[in-house]
Amino acid sequence: MTAYRRNFVPGGCFFFTVNLAERKLSLLTDHVELFRETHRRHPFAIDAIVALPDDLHTVWMLAEGDANFAMRWQLIKSAVSRRLARNERISQSRSAKGERGIWQRRYWEHTIRDETDLARHVDYVHINPVRHGLVDRVHDRAPSSFHRHVELGNYPADWAGDQSDDGRDYGER
């Protein structure tokens, strides 16, 4: 079995990508409200987040002394799984282990190193719906922290412009 190494940094800032097992479903945008339960019980700061139909990108800042993002992801995945009907396709290996077939087993985690790294990952989160062709303008995507960042003055409302014609640049700083 592969031994995955996670960088558990107390009070750290992390970028995550979490995917559905069945990439053609839209469970994440259909049930985005189910993520809030874990956030209330085990607080952390969400610097950026966007829900796409089959994956989620987010940047979290954990409290000083807290490094347990893995527990939060386990709770989020299980909370969502408990509330969804059992009608997903389940592989033989998952079935043998009594697992649901909603989530990919792993997730991508990256420890944010500095302010430049943070800015790049927050930009990546917000531009992702454009890159996937879901919208032409970043501000057209509803389940996104981009709107909060505009209110805070971190981005102009027209950040990254209209990508419907050529898709160049994607608004990187």
Image (cartoon, rainbow, N blue to C red):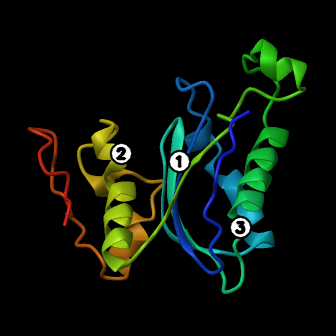
Secondary structure of residue under mark 3: helix
Q: Earlier in the sequence, mark 3 or mark 1?
A: 3
Give the numbered dot on residue 39: 3
Using residue 40 as the reference point, say whether residue 139 is left or right of it: left
What's the CA distance linking mark 2 and mark 3? 23 Å
Residue at the spot 31% in from the left edge and 53% down from the top edge? 127
Instruction: Name the quarter where the N terminus is drawn.
Output: top right
Q: In this image, 97 relative to 157: left or right? A: right
Please give the residue where the numbered disc 2 appears in the rendered image.
129
Residue 56, label in figure: 1
SS at circle 1? strand
- Please provide percent x and percent y for residue 67: 69, 72
Q: Is residue 109 above or below residue 106?
A: below
Q: Tell whether 57 sits left or right of 82.
A: left
Query: Which amino acid type is shown beneath numbered disc 1?
Result: Leu
> Which kind of residue does numbered mark 3 sit on?
His
Q: Residue 69, located in which quarter of the rendered image? A: bottom right
User: The residue under label 2 is which amino acid type?
Assistant: Pro
Q: From the viewer's side, name the closer residue of 70 and 50.
A: 70
Q: Give coordinates of residue 104: x percent, y percent.
A: 65, 34
